[in-house]
Amino acid sequence: MDMATDLQDFLIRLDRDIRARGDWGEVADYIPELARIAPGQFGIAVVTADGALATAGDATKGFSIQSISKVFTLACVLGRIGEQIWTRVGREPSGLRFDSIQLLETEDGRPRNPFINAGALVVTDELLTGRGPQDALAEILGFIRTAAGDDDIHIDRAVAQSEAGTGHRNIALAHYLKSCGNLRNAPELVLGTYFHQCAIEMSCVQLAMAGRAIAGLPDAPPVLSRARARRLNALMMLCGHYDGSGDFAFRVGLPGKSGVGGGILLIAPGRASIGIWSPGLNVFGNSHMGTHAAEALARATGWSVFG
Ligand code: GLN
């Protein structure tokens, strides 16, 4: 499928099929602001290497990017301190839920990878080195806006407040990391910054645009070297969907990063950057219909990295 019109037609049909199924999954309920979102929504945006944009459904509606922010914070940290970050966090799949505390005890507080919550807290802690939360958040937002070529991307403070009020699991993770000596800043400071980065609101179109550099598309803003992009893709493939990463690779065959807001940033290296959103989640905490859409798109385009 090379023609832009074929892709556009495919997305319209996919949107129609998904709405006809009505099998949406459950919205995240541990963050009260997210629990209020209606599950029956779906959007998709695909930017291809020729710069064309194809969309369907709620592709311009903003949603909470949540853990997709972890890709951007890692890119910022790699830009600041390079590969030194790997002394504080690993790059292996955890095989456990995104918010699991289990391995921290047996592995001396070094999280398995930067995409589980414990690892993301360490990455955010690194971004706070020598400055406060406002400046760290400004860097994260600046990176995303430049990558997307769009300044109209903001933090939804109500979502951040909502998570801060109920985020006991993350609070426990941050304090555990601190007790192991793997958090430099006060846990409260790291958590506040983390809840705000997760509360960044973007649409599928903005997400697809922001992923162009990770996909290595020709016109992408130069926010990332090819070597770094390659490594982000490897991490996204192996760890981007937590304990559902194997299932996602099996079904889709593309690097992706999910968030509990129901978003997925999906990368077809050299070919396309894709933003998908449907707020109902599957058992792994990844978008239920979003995963279905990614699978259908990969099948129709032949974009799987596995041939
Ligand atoms: N803010 C969420 C949390 O820390 C992000 C989790 C996710 O999107 N998987 O629980």
Image: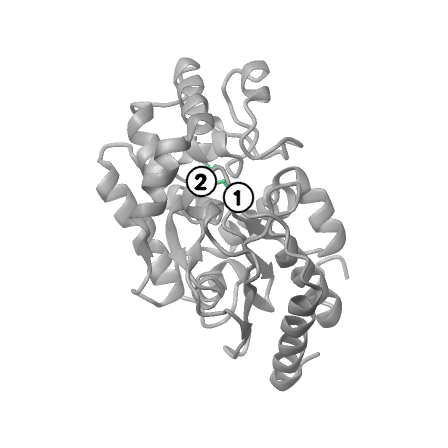
Label 2 Cα neighbours within 10 Å, binned few <14 / some 14-19 / many ≥20:
many
Whether the residue carrying mark 1 lies under 8 Å from ligand 1 is answered with yes
Helix, strand or loop at label 1? It is loop
- Quadrant of the rendered image containing residue 39: bottom right
Q: Position of residue 64 (x, y in %)?
A: 43, 52
Q: Is residue 294 visible?
A: yes
Residue at position x 65%, y 74% from top? 16
Spot occupied by residue 284 in the image (x, y as percentages of width and height):
64, 41
Q: Is mark 2 within 8 Å of ligand 1?
A: yes
Label 1, on which residue? Answer: 28
Residue ID at (64%, 68%): 19
Residue 262, x across and y down, in percent: 54, 52
Which amino acid type corresponds to the residue marked 1 in the rendered image? Answer: Ala
- 49, above or below 248, in the image: below
Spatial separation of the CA atoms under disc 2 and disc 1 = 7 Å
* Quadrant for the C terminus in the image: bottom right
Which residue corresponds to the image point at 34% horizontal and 54% vertical from the top-left? 143
Identity, as a three-letter code, of the amino acid under mark 2: Ile
Residue 52 drawn above or below residue 190: below
Q: Is residue 80 visible?
A: no
Residue 165 found in image quarter: top left
Secondary structure beneath dot 2 equals loop
Specify the label residue 31 is tagged with.
Answer: 2
